[in-house]
Amino acid sequence: MLATGLVAASALIALFLGFGHLYLTYFTPSFQPRDPQLGQKLTEVPLVITRDRSFARANVGFHASHGFGLILLGAVYGYLALAQSAFFFQSHYLVAVGAVAWGCYLVLALRYWYVVPQLLAGLAFLCYAVGVATAYLG
């Protein structure tokens, strides 16, 4: 079924983005500032909300939680699409939550991120939207 495949494809993109984000967070300097002096300063200065965490340390947590959120989105919606497609497409709530999630990721990508996640978030949103539309209209 085309609808199932498209929603599963959007879930696969979420998994790819999530695992990729974790990899970039923990195994590369990709999310570090290019200016070494700024990087050092970010490890020394605490956040306003607490004196126990520097911006640099909190930043790792923010990136990790973002990656895990994408993995959760991909795992849940991939399972729903592939193993519970009838239940999924009959649940207007689950379909709407997925659409809102992908819509939010797309807006964030277009506003704050760089070209690769923008393209992938756009593709995932398109796959999800066309998959849902196909299920309801076709």
Image (cartoon, rainbow, N blue to C red):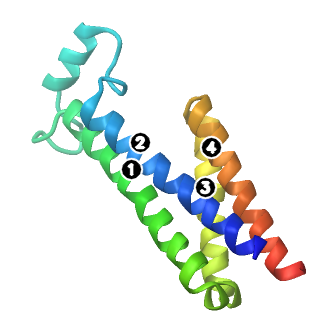
Q: Quadrant of residue 4?
A: bottom right
Quarter of the image containing the C terminus? bottom right
- Residue 98 placement (x, y as % from top left): 61, 69
The disc placed on residue 120 is: 4
Dot 4 or dot 2, earlier in sequence: 2
Q: Which mark is residue 104?
A: 3
Depth check: give the residue in front, 90 or 86. 86
Q: Earlier in the sequence, mark 1 or mark 4?
A: 1
Q: Callout 4, which amino acid?
A: Leu
Q: Earlier in the sequence, mark 1 or mark 3?
A: 1
Q: CA distance from mark 2 to mark 3?
A: 19 Å
Tag 2's secondary structure? helix
Choose the circle earlier in sequence order: 2 or 3.
2
Q: Amino acid at mark 2?
A: Gly
Which quarter shows the N terminus? bottom right
Discs 2/1, front: 2
Query: Mark 3: which amino acid?
Result: Cys
Residue contact between numbered discs 2 and 1, judged by CB atoms under 8 Å: yes
Q: Secondary structure at mark 3?
A: helix
Q: Gap in Å between the C-alphas at discs 2 and 1?
A: 8 Å
Q: Does residue 86 appear to the left or right of 79 in the view shown?
A: right
**Residue 27 vertical placement versus 89 (above, below):** above
Question: In the rendered image, which residue does mark 2 sit on?
Answer: 20
How many residues crowd around disc 2 within 10 Å: few (fewer than 14), some, or many (20 or more)?
Answer: few
Asked whether disc 1 touches disc 3, contact meaning CB atoms under 8 Å apart, the reply is: no
Q: Which residue is mark 1?
A: 67
Residue that appears at 31% across and 36% down = 25
- The amino acid sitting under disc 1 is Gly
Disc 1 residue crowd, few under 14, some 14–19, many 20+, Cα 10 Å: many
Question: Could you tell me which secondary element the residue under label 1 belongs to?
Answer: helix
